[in-house]
Image: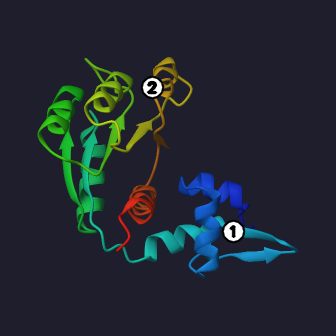
Amino acid sequence: MAELMTVGELASYLRVTEKTVYRLLKRGLLPATKVGRQWRFDKALVDGWLRQRPVEAKASILVVDDEQSIRLMFKQTLEELGHRVEVAESSLKGLELVKQRNFDMVFLDLKMPMMDGAELFRQIKALRPKLPVIIITGYPDSEIMARALSLGPFGVMNKPFSASDIITAVNTFVQFTAPKV
């Protein structure tokens, strides 16, 4: 059975405002169905739409995770789409890369040795307040997550996730934050 979302739920899912959803609807860009007077969105169709939409803007992405398999999954998945991907196996290396380069977005693991993701997030925000960060975690209800939440807005990807989830997250970011020409 189809998982249908309301305008508000879709806006939250895409991490955009409801106004943006209505703008996309008006331009005929979103797969949608009208039920009575309300718009509804089939999650599977929206996911397919996100994967198939041409993304002209390529992003420079940093992935900070102590698990090699996660870093490799991000790197292979995103480089196949033409994005530039840097990986760091520790928070300290990730912080150094943020200081040295300009990234369009950062994926960072919440639970890492030496410096956890919440502390890295705090330091990234101090250096580059507008840099979008998506925290990847298997511990969404942890004390570390609570600390991160107190530092400001960010996206969250719960583990386990698939290559499709990575693509959807990046495509959503690129489509809705790339400058309009």
* Residue 60 higher or lower than 24, as above or below: above
From the image, which quarter does the N terminus lie in? bottom right
Left or right: residue 145 versus residue 36 is left
Q: Nearer the viewer, residue 47 or 13?
A: 13
Q: Nearer the viewer, residue 149 or 74?
A: 149
Of all residues, the one furthest to the right in this rendering is 36
Question: Residue 125: horizontal and vertical position, in percent?
Answer: 33, 31
Q: How many residues crowd around disc 2 within 10 Å: few (fewer than 14), some, or many (20 or more)?
A: few
The amino acid type found where label 1 is placed reads: Phe
Q: In the image, what residue occupies the spot 20% across and 44% down? A: 87
Reading the image, the residue beneath label 2 is: 151
Tell me if I can see residue 154 in this picture: yes
Q: In the image, what residue occupies the spot 61% across and 68% down? A: 44
| SS type, badge 2 | loop
Q: Are marks 2 and 1 in contact (CB under 8 Å)?
A: no
Reading the image, the residue beneath label 1 is: 41
Q: Nearer the viewer, residue 6 or 90?
A: 6
The amino acid type found where label 2 is placed reads: Leu
Q: Which mark is residue 28?
A: none
Tell me if I can see residue 158 in this picture: no
Q: How many residues crowd around disc 1 within 10 Å: few (fewer than 14), some, or many (20 or more)?
A: many
From the image, which quarter does the C terminus lie in? bottom left
* Residue 11 higher or lower than 126, as above or below: below
Left or right: residue 86 versus residue 74 is left
Left or right: residue 35 versus residue 77 is right
Q: In the image, what residue occupies the spot 41% across and 39% down? A: 136
Calculate the distance from the C-alpha at mark 2 to the C-alpha at mark 1: 32 Å
Of all residues, the one furthest to the left in this rendering is 100
Q: In the image, what residue occupies the spot 44% across and 76% down? A: 53
Question: Residue 129: horizontal and vertical position, in percent?
Answer: 34, 36
